[in-house]
Image (spheres, helix red, strand yellow):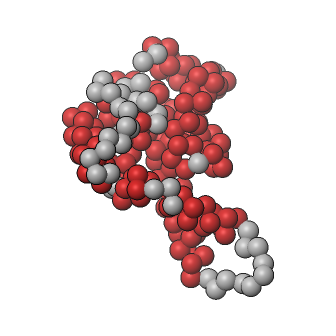
Amino acid sequence: MRADDAALIEESWRRPDAFAVLYDRYFGDVYRYVAGRVGTQVADDLAAETFVVAYGKRATFDPGRGAVRAWLFGIATNLVAQHRRSETRRLEALRRTPAEDGTDGGHEDRVAARLLAAGARGRLAAELRRLPDHDRDVLLLVALADLNYEEVAQALDIPSGTVGSRLNRVRRKLRAALGGADPAIGATDD
């Protein structure tokens, strides 16, 4: 935890440009996490939106609850969930819409094609999709964002013991689904 992060948030109340230091410090980490969740095409937008939301909510940041970094990952996780819900609604609407012959349907068709292609990546991808959101969020915050248990707990506003039990359960499920193979989703028990 960087001690000066909370001070930067407080300073940004008086000098809004102080928040840019946090953006410079953590944008890359947030981007990599978001890109691992939703792909690089929308990662720029969602990572940037994370900082827009954080800036707007900076007065509500409580340093007593944890680090700024984990707070940012919590915001990013919520934005990823919102994006997925929105994408699901768009794809469901697209599914109900009759296809037109001989025309390029645009972005929605490309998204649908990408999702179908992603489904062919193997059993691991399929099993990850089957996980409940709360389990998947814990796993991906550890595996992609490299957060420790305390940071995941702060990001998701759950007890750190819950992080450990969810991660253990997810690892068992994935190992069983992969025929006993270790999914090598390398999290450490910090």
In the visual, does 184 lie left or right of 163? right
Say which residue appears at 39% left-offset and 45% top-offset: 137
In the visual, does 41 lie left or right of 38? right
Name, please, the residue furthest toward the top.
Answer: 3
Q: Where does residue 187 sit, x and y in percent of width and height? A: 35, 32
Say which residue appears at 42% left-offset and 36% top-offset: 143
Q: Where does residue 114 sit, x and y in percent of width and height? A: 61, 61
Say which residue appears at 50% left-offset and 61% top-offset: 119
In the visual, does 95 lie left or right of 65? right
Q: Eyeballing the image, is 48 above or below 15? A: below
Task: Tell me, yes or no, if residue 11 can be seen here.
Answer: yes
Q: Where does residue 131 sit, x and y in percent of width and height? A: 34, 55
Q: In which quarter of the image is the N terminus?
A: top left
Q: Where does residue 126 sit, x and y in percent of width and height? A: 41, 58
Q: Which of 170 and 7 is in front in this view?
A: 170
Say which residue appears at 36% left-offset and 42% top-offset: 183
Q: Which of 73 and 179 is in front in this view?
A: 179
Could you tell me how many numbered marks the image carries?
Answer: 0
Image quadrant in which you'd find residue 102: bottom right
Task: Tell me, yes or no, if residue 61 can be seen here.
Answer: no
Q: Quadrant of the C terminus?
A: top left
